[in-house]
Amino acid sequence: MLTIKEVLLKSSDFFASKGIDSPRLDAELLMGHALRMSRIQLYMNFDKPLTEDELTCIRGFVKRRSNREPIAYIIEEKGFYKFDFTIVPGVLCPRPDTETIIEVANHWIPKDRDYFICDVGSGSGCIGLSLLLEHPNARLYATDISESALRCTKLNIKRHNLMTRAAPLKGPFLQPIPLERPIDLIVSNPPYIPTSEIEGLAPEVANHEPRLALDGGQDGLDCYRALIQQAAPRIRDGIIVEIGLGQESAVADLMKDAGLIDIELHNDLTDRVRIVSGRKPSI
Ligand code: GLN
């Protein structure tokens, strides 16, 4: 009978041979998920033999990962900022790059009054729901055109018990939010990859993540054009968006042209410009 240690070794060697970046970590995450054990528990039970059922389950996970399916889809979870979110195929896997939106928004959101946020293209809901968890006075509209993404947003609203403060709405950009509803802040990580570049991305992304969450049109900027145009007249406070590498001046210009001020660029955790924000001038 094979032990936890033996199967971990075999799986991580297999992943390495498939060109997977973090073979040992991935093997441990999948094993932990199959056995419902933390990674520490795995280490404490290294010599435990696996049952036939456990092995079958792990083999299934290893096969999926060797096809370069993202870990988050297999273990149905991903940590983002300070929280864990349920992830299903059909939504973008949250990335640490996006956490900078939360850091910027945390400085903007006042503590002492109702504050209305809209997360456009909510996907898992990781951006908007993290903000709700950090700011008890905030309320959220989470919009997405994808049915499966919105289903995932709803799972996470329930998971974090935010039903009274979050409204998941299906539709493009701000369209599903009735015009009389206030919006203070828009946050968004829209699709921004130029169509022709998608095929060249890592197989995890190109073959498994939803096209709808990635494809930003010919120059990658389609969503910013539509979003900023709709946002500028409606927001009371401002907008914070994630961008792809090198898109900052184009997106800053779109914000300027729409009449926004105080346009700022922010770096992600690897010190590259990945976030652009703009404010509504006060009247
Ligand atoms: N808002 C989600 C995220 O940042 C989904 C973004 C998207 O689908 N482009 O992970």
Image (cartoon, helix red, strand yellow):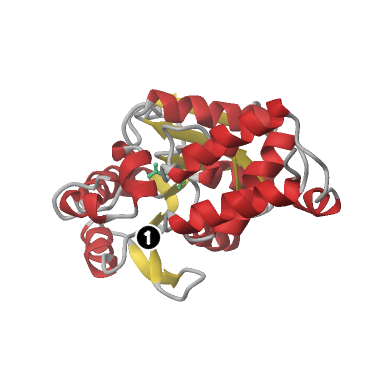
Give 155 or 113, whichever is nearer the viewer.
155
Give SS at disc 1. loop
- Residue 277: x and y in percent read 40, 62
Residue at 51% from the left image edge and 43% from the top image edge: 117
Q: Which amino acid, mark 1?
A: Pro
The quarter of the image that holds ligand 1 is top left
User: Of residues 82 and 30, which is closer to you in this image?
Assistant: 30
Residue at 46% in and 45% down: 66
Q: Position of residue 193 (x, y in %)?
A: 26, 53
Q: Residue at x 65, y 27 (%)?
A: 158
* Most foreground residue, 168 or 244: 244
Q: Is mark 1 within 8 Å of ligand 1?
A: no
Give the quadrant of residue 164: top right
Residue for point 36% across, 42% down = 234
Residue 236 at least partly seen: yes
Residue that numbered label 1 is attached to: 281
Q: The C terminus appears in which quarter of the rendering?
A: bottom left
Q: Position of residue 146 (x, y in %)?
A: 36, 28
Label 1, residues with CA under 10 Å away: few <14, some 14-19, many ≥20? few
> In which quadrant is the N terminus drawn?
top right
| As drawn, 205 above or below 122 | below
